[in-house]
Amino acid sequence: MESSSPVLAAFGNPLWDLCVSLPNNGLLSEFGLADDSSTEVTAPEFESLLRSVESLTDISYSKKGCPGGAALNTIRIFQWLVGQQTQPKLSSVFFGSIGDDENGKLLTKSVSSVGVDVRFKIRSGQLTGSAICLIHNDLRTLVAHLGAANVYFPQDITQEDSSIIARVKVVYIENYFFSHSPSVVWDIVKLCKIQGVIIVFNLSGVYLFEKHAADIASLVKYVDIVVGNESEFVALANTREWKIYSDIFDLANKICAIGVQTLSSVSPGDIKPAKLRYLEDLGKVTVVTRGHKPILCAAEGNPLFSTPTLNPKFGVKDTTGAGDAFVAGFLMGIIHELPLSQCVHLGCYASTEIIQQIGCSPPENPPLTIEEIENNFLNH
């Protein structure tokens, strides 16, 4: 297929993942880890956990590892989804930092092979970020050492990078990235506001609110679409003016009600029309994932609705990257300017495909077309 210029750009922490299926919760208890949680640790702590994992018997894991990191997972699944959908083929670009080491080389090769324009900054003398996904009772616990991924500066965005970002339709930013490089994100937000690029922000991990609550709450005001799970939205609500709400439905609506604010540093005369004009009528959008419970989606100019998730045909093997895959499908729908309900359907389909395998990697089988996915929901 002929390639086009990227329609989607993402900023995140690129990681090299190791997925481990645990026979019991002994290792989790030993290291004080909770099921279905995410945490960042120091290099010595990560190495200690890795040694314990490698010393276990009766486990299943890939010594070769695979690419990981929330936004990078989303970009890779997005490329899998669009592979069968359009001509010319839609493409994406990813920004983040890696180390000058073997894992960095493996990461670059693997991500590039699925059609992503990889714009990694290589940090000499630093290790590529890594994560261990501990799978127990169909839930995943993520332990990460960010290494080089924890470093990204405003000056890392070149003139060529800015030109690429200005041409995409959507920029996707994970909170993990924002927590260590807020100045970069604010620069990107300003560029997107001027160029009419849609900004999608993922709340990512609850623990990020412990140190960055005020900054996160501030950024949420300026983005077009906010995505996260129920716990993350509750953490957001506890930071500012959303403390008083009756339930998660009410909270989703209240966040939408603040609208999409403009930066005081951007003159109205400098702002170009939105790349996706249909979203202007909807206003701010919130998407709340809730595990196996129905997805919630609200918009400033649209009534809140919920959508049941799909039942996996072959059972749940690993929830690693389920939320990341959902976002990939949702973004594909947004870029195709589909109704929000259909965007959610695409997200549910992608998530269901991913949880039927170990790790968050594009499945070997080709995806269904947009029409086939929608028909599945109509007949569900």
Image (cartoon, grey):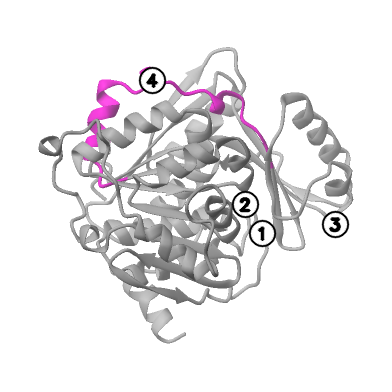
Amino acid of disc 2? Gly
Task: Give the CA distance from mark 2 to mark 3.
Answer: 17 Å
Q: Residues within 10 Å of mark 1 (few under 14, many from 20)?
A: many
Q: Answer whether labels 2 and 1 touch (C-beta < 8 Å).
A: yes
For the point 72% across and 27% down, which residue is it? Answer: 42
Left or right position of 247 against 10: right
Amino acid marked by disc 1? Asp
Disc 3: CA contacts within 10 A as few (<14), some (14-19) or many (>=20):
some
Q: Which residue is mark 1?
A: 318
Give the structural element (helix, strand or loop) at label 2.
loop
Gap between marks 2 and 1 measured at Cα:
7 Å
Please give the residue where the numbered disc 3 appears in the rendered image. 23
Relative vertical location of residue 125 with respect to residue 264 in this rendering, above or below: above
Q: Position of residue 246 (x, y in %)?
A: 54, 69
Describe the element under mark 4 as helix, strand or loop: helix
Residue farthest to the left, as pictured: 269
Mark nearer the N terminus (4 vs 2):
4
Q: Amino acid at mark 4?
A: Asp
Q: Is residue 17 left or right of residue 153?
A: right
Bounds of the magenta segment: 143-170
Residue 160 is one of the magenta-drawn residues: yes
Coordinates of residue 35 in the picture (x, y in percent): 75, 55
Q: Residues within 10 Å of mark 2 (few under 14, many from 20)?
A: many
Residue identifier under label 4: 156
User: From the viewer's perspective, is the residue at label 1 or at label 4 nearer?
Assistant: 4
Q: Is residue 226 visible?
A: yes
